[in-house]
Structure formats: structure tokens, C-alpha cells
Image (spheres, rainbow, N blue to C red):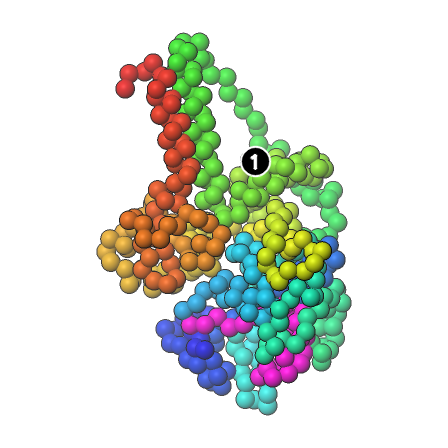
Amino acid sequence: ECLDVLTAAGDKTGVSKPRSEVHRDGDYHRAVHVWIYCESTGELLLQHRADCKDSWPGQWDISSAGHISAGDSSLSSARRELQEELGIKLPVDAFELIFVFLQECVINNGTYTNNEYNDVYLVTTLTPIPLEAFTLQESEVSAVRYMHRDEYKSCLAAESGEYVPYDVNGQYGQLFSIIEERYKDNTESRSLTLQKQISRYAPIHLEPELTTLSEGDKEALGYILKASMVIDEIFYEQVWNSNTMLRDWLRAHADSSSLDSLKWAYYSINKSPWSCLDENKAFLSTADSAVKLLTDATKPISGWKGLEYRAAFPLDKPRGANFYPADMNKMEFDLWKSGLTDKEQKDATGFFTVIKRPDALLTTSVVESDGPNQTNTSDDLFIVPYSKEYKASLEKATELLIKASDCSDCPR
């Protein structure tokens, strides 16, 4: 396995080296940490590292972790490691990138240097995954167990030798503070905050004058309004890949409590979980998000309906929205773009295309192989024109506009 060598600041150098040489020479590189958190019990899933591991053998550690191979993406690596080590197959919307952690240490009597930038992901499940549902990779993992987050934090703080060490008072303390913040009992405080945010907006009622319009034009306006609502649906999709699921979930649960009603009201204004008047600060978290059920995420277990998880979204509004892969940075995009033809570069930077990774095919059906206007110039990124990405919505809007035209009295 080869890894991309990074600068001390975390930027790619353009050089890749075998994993053993990276740790021998102390090169900076990237890896992923994936934590599975059960919100009903407050427990984190820990894995027991196999005794044959070259680092921290026989100690309890992250649910799943691994290096990002040269040329691979962070999210793809996170999904792959979870499936290989624990036998859990999850779609991209299950993974929430919560922070990046730089681990710098020397172990094994100075023979193993770990200068590692770790993308830390959180997968939130409603209930514990039955231990018998896991398929463990014996060369990596010898056992798994659940442990309450507070107990685990205490063991790390006490520097217990049973656990791979992490400084809970340093960067890695974010794992616990993020979880604690979103699950603490603060219903009253959240309600007051949302009420104040909503009160900054004044509702405006529009009363158009329609008496001068013919019956045909009035009917046409109805179709135009329906078409605009279809286009609005595209906007929701463009904000974030799970935004429509979040919207539908909040709307369906708006009557569950006064807090849920406020969540839905403020979401309806922003059309996202990020507040426009507060520099896009999130007013919701993945703990508020939609619940999805996967019946085939693990091997089947009698009496267990399957894995229920929260569709994730980041606390920081993605700069690339849903037009680009969530884990793609500018350097990767520029490097990929440099290998395209002039026409492909124009498409890649145009206003009517989205960029996707092949793993998006696992959760969407919009990318059609060998389409005339779709470009797949590498194993990692795709150019997809709007006409294909939003094909179903555009066709529906077109039908409505044609109906509007047919019933309108306005000359064509």
C-alpha cells in the first residue's frame, strides 16, 4: 500500500511512498477514523486491535480506522475500512466529518513514527448494532464492544494501558464535546434561540390582482406555480445531498413538540440547517436529522430489522454545496482538471454541471454510463450536466410549462 506524502501543513507533495517507508521516515500522511455512536445508549463502538498489528497491538481503539491510499479519497477510505474491518456497508450520507486531528508520535522504540492527519467521521445509529452482526477482519480486529462515552473518556484521561492513547484535553476532546453538546437536555434553551432567530423575519402576504386575467391565464398561472415548486426541489438537492431527507423528516415531525415545530419553521425559512443571518452557522445537527433503515448493511440477524442511522450533514456549510464531492479539496480538483481536454475543462468549471465520485452511484441513479454529455475521465471524478443530474425534475417542470402554454390566452 502506497500513501500520499504530505507537507507538515497537510498539503500533498506529489510524492507517494510505501506505507512502511512513510512510518519509518516519519512522513506526514492521511488516514480516517470512523466512530459508530449509538444515541439511545450514549455508547461508542470500540474495536480491539489484533495482536499482530504493528502499532498499538492488543489495545482498544476507534470503531474503524485506516490509511488513505495514494490517490484515494477520504470518504471512500472511510466506507472501505468500515466494510473491511467490521463488515458494515453504509452509504455516503451515514458519514459526518466532525473534525481533522493531527497525531504526531513515535512508538515501538523509535522505529515507528506516526505523523498522521486523521479525518474523523461519526456514524450515528439509533440503537446498538448486535455484536453478532459484525464480520471482523481477523488480521485487524479481534473483538468489538460498546462503551459509554463518559467511561471511555475517563479511561483515556487516566491513560489506561488498555486503550490506544488520545489526548481528551487536546484536539481529540472534540469528539466528546461535539456529542455532549448535541445530546444534552437543552430543549428550553434551543426553543428560545429558535424563537429569537425566527422573530427577525417579518411575514409578507402577497395579494395579486387577478381580476383582469382570463380564465385560461389563471389556469396557466396554476401550472407555472407548480413548475416553480418543482424547480425549488432542485434547489433543495443542490444545497446538500441529504437536505431533502432532512426537510421531509422535519416536516413530518413538526407536530411532535413545540421545539420540533420551531425547527421546521426556521428550516422552512433557510431551506437548509444553516442560518443565513448568522453567517451560515448550523442551528440543527445530525441528531435532528432523518432516520434511515438499512436491512442489508450487515449480515442478517434473526429478529433484528436492520441498522437505523441518522442521515448526516456537517456543522459547517459545505463551500461546494452538493455540486462537488464533500471530501474534495481545490488541490484535488485542479490536479484532476489538468488532465482534461479543453472542452472537458470548460464543462468542469461551467455553471451547468456537477462533479461526482463513482461512490455517488451507490446512492443515486442520475449518472448514466456512456451518456453522450457525461464525462468520466478518471476513476475518481465524473462531470454530470444538469440535464442528466436533474433530469426527472426538469422533465416534470417542462410538462407543466407546456400545459400552461396550452391553456393560456397569451399569443405564442
* Residue 180 position by quadrant: bottom right
Q: 335 or 191, which lies in front? A: 335
**Taking 37 as reference, is 230 above or below it?**
above
The picture places residue 130, in percent across and down from the top left corner, at 70, 62
x, y percent for residue 362? 48, 55
| Residue sitting nearer the eye, 14 or 123 | 123
Residue at 73 percent across and 44 percent down: it is 187
Residue 119: image quadrant is: bottom right
Res. 371 in view? yes
Q: Quadrant of the N terminus?
A: bottom left
As drawn, the residue found furthest toward the front would be 302
Q: Is residue 45 above or below residue 202?
A: below
Residue 138 located left or right of residue 356: right
Q: Amino acid at mark 1?
A: Ser
State which quarter of the image contains the C terminus.
Answer: top left
Is 68 colored magenta in this rendering? yes
Mark 1 Cα within 10 Å, few/some/many (few <14, many 20+)?
some
Q: Which residues are magenta?
A: 46-70
Residue that numbered label 1 is attached to = 268
